[in-house]
């Protein structure tokens, strides 16, 4: 009787028409699921509404199986009669370790036209049926890769119902659709997680450089000089101590908390952050933010220090997020190189060509070193009493791809500022020691001494003493024949460390000379505190000899003090024979310069030594 009443309420529809209607609904549902619904919840809303409307089922619920506990929990519920989704108390659960659960595991659907006539269902779900008035059900398992993960329940309330084969096929397809929706959602979560990992730094959980490039690229648009522009701020850290990771995380946390939503902050280097403020800025506002960032980092503790560089989009010839960030980094490097570890520097577009040239020079110099285009030349150091060669100074020369020789002054500053001077200096030392060990001994039996320059960067390296010892051991050159020359500026950044290094070098038997004496910070007072064995008088005092009486007095005073202190003295930059009597008058006995010979390759030097100097 109930079935007849149900049929009378519906339009007449044969099984073929019903199947076509179901298929059309499935096609439309698939199209909507693939083209939209970013969230699992919105997709389940669409699935449940489509299933209820198509089957004319009073209730459609989606249940998720928790396999470890064998519990089915409702994750979405829809009531066709009221149009309500997820009414209060919908997220109920029941045990699936019963006949119902076991049956689900092996079928495409469970069809119960009248649940009251099924003892197994009543034993498993009788309370649930009574609570919701369920009289009939058509349930479809949800499987992922063949494993049961849930069930879709199509329920009729109040009276039994006969489900046709078309209904059964449709319900089974809805179970497949829910499995598809869950899998799509899982993959989207995985893709979002992968995308997040691609754009974030795992150590600080900040966005990385790629993320910041996207932010900057989206913000860039044309602006004129003097107008507010997109800014990038690069914050370079000095990380002292052993806990570099802890200091970095502390600094990132402090910056993130202080900046809040004011800017996008990212980690762009092992020891650097960058940020792009969300508002366009003028110079003063950008400087305020950059200065605040420096203060925040330094307040994070652990002896942290920082420098900041700022770049603006109006300095770009064409919109380029990458160039904007690189300009900010270059500005921070300039602030750091100038010793402005507590200050900020704005990128100067006028200096861009010079900076690019220096970067190209560094790249070419590195390539020349790798390709063997660098050479060691030697300038004689001569005894003024007899004109014989007493030693040589090893000098770096670069034979470039054009066939010419690059002036040393063109590239030595680039090598020093980039740190390339360290491997270059190590190589030059080894080459020079190897060459000097094979020089012939002059007729007077005095083996020639070798002088090699040491830069400030090399002095800072803990491995300098080991490098010198290794070069001597491999070449067989006696330590007493090697002089290391350094300027006093090389001692200034960390004088106590530099002095300890010099003492260790002298303990090897190597002698140390102070180069360019008389300029910069050099003074007689400093000589008392430096562990050195000789000085080289700067060419600026030699050039005025013999005409300038003040130069004569200065050179004579230096020679006298050095002689009484037991130090060797060499005059540099001798270019004219008229300077020789003046030097002898001042008490100078050893000199070097173009008058005695320009720097020459090792073969030419060997030939000159063989002729007696």
Image (cartoon, rainbow, N blue to C red):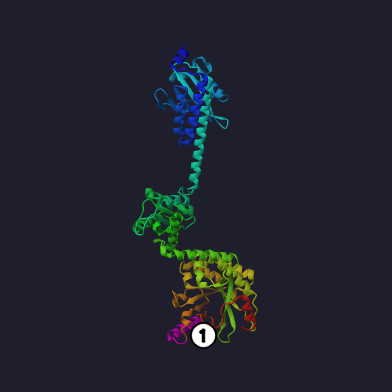
Q: Main secondary structure of the magenta part?
A: helix
Residue 91 visible in the displayed image: no
Q: Is residue 57 magenta?
A: no
Q: Determine whether 491 is above or below 161 in the image.
A: below
Dot 1 falls on a residue whose secondary structure is loop
Q: Which stretch did the figure color magenta?
A: 546-564
Percent of width and height locating residue 433? 61, 72
Q: Determine whether 405 is above or below 126 in the image.
A: below
Please identify the quarter of the rendering in which residue 602 is found: bottom right
Does residue 135 appear to the left or right of 610 in the view shown? left
Residue depicted at x 63% and y 73%:
435
Percent of width and height locating residue 193? 49, 42
Number of residues whose C-alpha sits closer than 10 Å to that of mark 1, classed few (under 14), some (14–19) or many (20 or more) = few
Percent of width and height locating residue 276? 40, 52
Q: Which residue is mark 1?
A: 576
Q: Determine whether 573 is above or below 179 in the image.
A: below
- Total label count? 1
Near-viewer residue (142 or 131): 142
Near-viewer residue (111 or 334): 111
Residue 581 visible in the displayed image: yes
Near-viewer residue (51 or 326): 51
Residue depicted at x 49% and y 56%:
242
Q: Quadrant of the C terminus?
A: bottom right
Residue, far top: 1
Does residue 589 appear to the left or right of 602 in the view shown? left
Q: Is residue 550 magenta?
A: yes
Percent of width and height locating residue 295? 38, 56
């Amino acid at each position: 009787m109930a079935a007849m009443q149900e049929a009378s309420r519906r339009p007449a529809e044969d099984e073929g028409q019903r199947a076509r209607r179901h298929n059309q609904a499935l096609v439309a549902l698939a199209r909507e699921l693939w083209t939209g619904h970013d969230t699992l919840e919105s997709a389940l809303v669409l699935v449940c509404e489509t299933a209820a409307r198509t089957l004319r089922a009073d209730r459609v619920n989606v249940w998720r199986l928790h396999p470890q506990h064998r519990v089915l929990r409702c994750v979405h519920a829809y009531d066709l009669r009221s149009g309500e989704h997820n009414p209060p108390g919908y997220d109920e659960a029941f045990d699936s370790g019963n006949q119902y659960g076991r049956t689900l595991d092996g079928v495409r659907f469970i069809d119960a036209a009248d649940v009251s006539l099924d003892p197994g269902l009543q034993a498993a779900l009788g309370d649930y049926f009574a609570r919701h008035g369920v009289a009939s059900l058509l349930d479809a398992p949800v499987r992922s890769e063949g494993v049961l993960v849930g069930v879709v329940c199509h329920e009729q309330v109040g009276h039994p119902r006969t489900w046709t084969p078309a209904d059964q096929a449709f319900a089974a397809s809805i179970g497949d659709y829910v499995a598809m929706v869950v899998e799509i959602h899982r993959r989207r979560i995985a893709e979002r997680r992968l995308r997040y990992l691609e754009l974030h730094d795992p150590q600080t959980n900040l966005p990385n450089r790629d993320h910041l490039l996207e932010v900057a690229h989206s913000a860039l648009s044309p602006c004129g000089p003097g107008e507010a522009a997109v800014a990038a701020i690069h914050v370079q850290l000095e990380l002292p101590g052993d806990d570099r990771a802890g200091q970095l995380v502390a600094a990132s946390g402090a910056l993130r908390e202080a900046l809040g939503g004011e800017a996008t902050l990212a980690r762009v280097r092992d020891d650097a952050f960058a940020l792009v403020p969300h508002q366009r800025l003028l110079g003063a506002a950008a400087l305020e933010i950059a200065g605040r960032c420096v203060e925040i980092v330094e307040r994070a503790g652990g002896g942290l220090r920082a420098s900041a560089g700022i770049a603006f989009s109006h300095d770009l010839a064409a919109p380029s997020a990458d160039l904007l960030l690189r300009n900010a980094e270059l500005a921070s490097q300039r602030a750091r190189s100038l010793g402005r570890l507590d200050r900020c520097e704005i990128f100067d577009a006028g200096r861009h060509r010079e900076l690019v040239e220096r970067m190209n020079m560094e790249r070419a110099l590195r390539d020349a070193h790798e390709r063997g285009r660098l050479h060691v030349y030697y300038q004689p150091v001569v005894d003024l009493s007899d004109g014989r060669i007493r030693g040589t100074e090893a000098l770096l020369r670069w034979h470039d791809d054009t066939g010419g020789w690059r002036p040393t002054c063109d590239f030595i500053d680039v090598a020093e500022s980039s740190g390339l001077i360290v491997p270059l200096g190590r190589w030059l030392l080894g080459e020079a020691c190897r060459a000097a060990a094979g020089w012939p001994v002059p007729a007077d039996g005095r083996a020639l001494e070798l002088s090699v320059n040491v830069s400030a960067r090399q002095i800072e390296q803990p491995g300098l003493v080991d490098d010198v010892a290794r070069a001597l051991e491999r070449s067989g050159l006696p330590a007493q024949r090697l002089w290391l020359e350094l300027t006093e500026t090389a001692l200034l950044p960390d004088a106590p460390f530099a002095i300890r290094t010099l003492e260790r070098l002298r303990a090897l038997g190597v002698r140390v000379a102070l180069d360019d004496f008389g300029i910069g910070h050099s003074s007689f007072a400093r000589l008392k505190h430096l562990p050195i064995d000789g000085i080289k008088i700067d060419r600026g005092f030699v050039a005025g000899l013999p005409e300038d009486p003040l130069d004569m007095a200065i050179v004579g005073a230096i020679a006298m003090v050095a002689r009484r202190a037991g130090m060797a003295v060499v005059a540099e930059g001798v270019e004219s024979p008229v300077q020789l009597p003046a030097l002898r008058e001042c008490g100078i006995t050893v000199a070097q310069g173009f008058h005695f010979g320009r720097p020459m390759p090792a073969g030419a030097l060997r030939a000159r030594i063989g002729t007696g100097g």
